[in-house]
Amino acid sequence: MFDRAQFWSPVPDWSQAVLRGERVTVTPVPVAAAYWLSGAATAFGPRDLVADDAYALRIAPDRVLFIGPSFVPEDFRNVVASSDISDGIVVFDVAGEGAAELMAQGGEYPFASAPGLPTESASLRFAGFRLAVMRRPAGWRLHIERPWAPALWQWLQAHVD
């Protein structure tokens, strides 16, 4: 039987990984809790500026990606179902004065524009991958499913100046 591992991107040690360019830095962010929530919940879109460490991103009208230090079901009274995906997601911060340019290379979405509609989804296509995007004070935060993270990391390596 053939070894198919050679076709997959090597998985970096996320605790040590960092990409530093002249104007942009990309770092993996450790996540204590990540949940898919189904039901009505207040959440942010991709251009809403979020500075907190606990937040909910709008993925669909009745679907939210919650990231935070811990999940407290009482905080989300209208949620009908939750799924723990803490081990299934990797999060990257893209920061620096060149962050907007890097984000523009990954997709045609107007990342730097003012906040969008209150129904705008944080789930979009970036660099050929489906991921959730959130605006941070120093740049953006990318949330991707763990199996695709090494491939996104390779794309980021090729585009960090």
Image: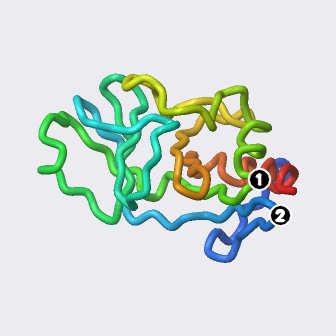
Sequence order check, earlier mark of 1 and 2: 2
Judge by depth and name the residue closer to the eye, 84 or 65: 65
State the residue position of label 1: 98
- Quarter location, residue 71: bottom left
Q: Position of residue 102 (x, y in %)?
A: 76, 46
Judge by depth and name the residue closer to the eye, 12 or 39: 39
Q: Position of residue 65 (x, y in %)?
A: 39, 42
Q: Nearer the viewer, mark 1 or mark 2?
A: 1
Q: Is residue 141 above or below residue 36?
A: below
Q: Residues within 10 Å of mark 2 (few under 14, many from 20)?
A: some
Residue lying at 33% horizontally and 38% vertically, measured from the top left: 43
Q: CA distance from mark 1 to mark 2?
A: 9 Å
Judged from the image, the secondary structure of the residue bearing numbered disc 2 is: loop
Q: Position of residue 28 (x, y in %)?
A: 61, 64
Please tell me the numbered disc located at residue 49. none
Q: Residues within 10 Å of mark 1 (few under 14, many from 20)?
A: some
Mark 1–mark 2 CB contact (< 8 Å): yes
In the image, is 99 to the left or to the right of 112?
Answer: right
Judge by depth and name the residue closer to the eye, 5 or 150: 150
Residue lying at 23% horizontally and 30% vertically, measured from the top left: 39
Q: Position of residue 114 (x, y in %)?
A: 53, 33
For badge 1, the amino acid type reads Gly
For badge 2, the amino acid type reads Gly
State the residue position of label 2: 21
In the image, is 130 to the left or to the right of 7?
Answer: left
Judged from the image, the secondary structure of the residue bearing numbered disc 1 is: loop
The quadrant of the image that shows the C terminus is bottom right
- Quarter location, residue 18: bottom right
